[in-house]
Image (tube, rainbow, N blue to C red):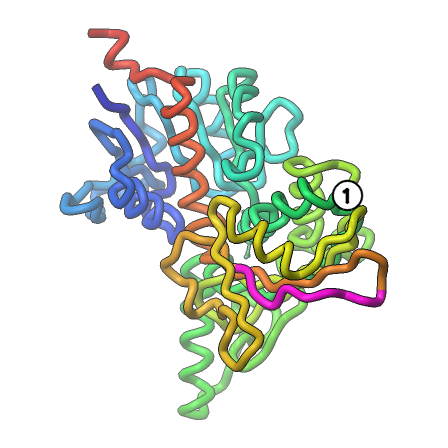
Amino acid sequence: MGYKVAIAGATGNVGAEMLDILAERGFPADEVIALASRRSQGKEISFGDKTLKVQAMENFDFSSVDICLMSAGGSIAKEWAPKIAAKGCVVIDNSSAWRYDADVPLIVPEVNADDIVDFKKKNIIANPNCSTAQLVVALKPIHEKAGIKRLVVSTYQSVSGGGKEAMDELFNQTRAVFVNDPIEPQKFTKRIAFNVIPHIDEFMEDGYTKEEWKVLAETKKMLDPTIKVTCTAVRVPVFVGHSESVNMELENPLSPEEAQDLLREAPGILVVDKREDGGYVTPYECAGEDATYVSRIREDATVENGLNMWVVSDNLRKGAALNTVQIAEVLVNRGLIKPKAEAAA
Ligand code: 11C
């Protein structure tokens, strides 16, 4: 007997990916329910070779649902996740609402799958921010082998991280440049077409942005609270795929060749690192892919045990939907939840 799975926020960028990934990976679901706001009620969306009719989350009874994959934004998650969890349905939330709660595990299966057992405290599991998910996948094997002391991360984040409207804005502005129409930024604070913007999410008192803070807080929570992390997060005119320049200061020496070998063996990573023209990955090539790609591994000779690398992944997949489905797979494969229908039979 399979699970009953609800997707809350099924009509968004990430919700659509969640449905695709559940179908692609053959998740053991007997029933999948697409939920969104009342505005989208009745809309049809595809799930594998089926079509699902979107239902309104407000009226939905979660009592018979086993797992809710939620990508509905922070304020909805804050309000709804505890209500859904109280119905005995495990919520795996993609927003930032629950990530920093000490009683909610923040999980990237390749990094800290064992922490998942804490889900029982609130029946809620958090999925990290897209820029952190791919980062920690690449850092984990290096930290285990050589100990990361300090990290300097610079991100180059695609517009899909900002949702469908942000993608439309890049498209429309790019077109406007070619036809000489006026450009009026809407979702972005400045023009994004043929430009880069060093600002993602709101500003905090210390001058960092919330996006930058998330990379710090989430890396520490999942990997090691003692690692020193600083970050600059930048929006670039790319539709899908976040890239990161990662500078590491390690406790122990690790040569670029050793790092390459380690990363090649690690789960979820593909190393593309030929020191020649085109011997590295770009976000365009990673869109639609599941792996976290690592390129440009090289020594940073300005510090003791310094290493640089370039990390790229599809932010809608490993950064969001794929990781959420992988968390659900950990729950299922480790026997941490049983289908309610099985217990009732
Ligand atoms: C972006 N990283 O690229 C953001 C999107 O906390 O889940 C995801 C925000 C989050 O704009």
Residue 49: where, in percent of width, then height? Answer: 14, 46
Asked if residue 70 lies in the magenta stretch, the reply is: no
Q: Amino acid at mark 1?
A: Ile
- Is residue 66 in sight in this rendering? yes
SS label for mark 1: loop
The N terminus lies in quadrant: top left
Q: Is residue 191 above or below residue 125?
A: below
Q: Which residue is mark 1?
A: 227
Ligand 1 has an atom within 8 Å of the beta carbon of the residue at disc 1: no
Please name the residue shown 22% across and 44% down the image.
47
Picture mark count = 1
| Camera-side residue of 341 and 281 | 281
Q: Is residue 92 above or below residue 192?
A: above
| Camera-side residue of 37 and 158 | 158
The prevailing secondary structure element of the residues shown in magenta is: strand
Q: Which residues are magenta?
A: 294-302
In this rendering, position of residue 214 left or right of residue 93: right
Residue 13: where, in percent of width, then height? Answer: 38, 53
Residue 26: where, in percent of width, then height? Answer: 25, 38
In this rendering, position of residue 166 left or right of residue 19: right
Please name the residue shown 64% across and 36% down the image.
222
In this rendering, position of residue 224 left or right of residue 334: right
Please name the residue shown 58% across and 28% down the image.
105
The C terminus lies in quadrant: top left
Please name the residue shown 44% across and 33% down the image.
327
Q: Is residue 199 above or below residue 100?
A: below
- Is residue 76 in sight in this rendering? no
Residue 257: where, in percent of width, then height? Answer: 63, 60
In this rendering, position of residue 305 left or right of residue 291: right
Tell me if mark 1 has few (under 14), some (14-19) or many (20+) residues whose alpha carbon lies within 10 angstroms of its own.
Answer: some
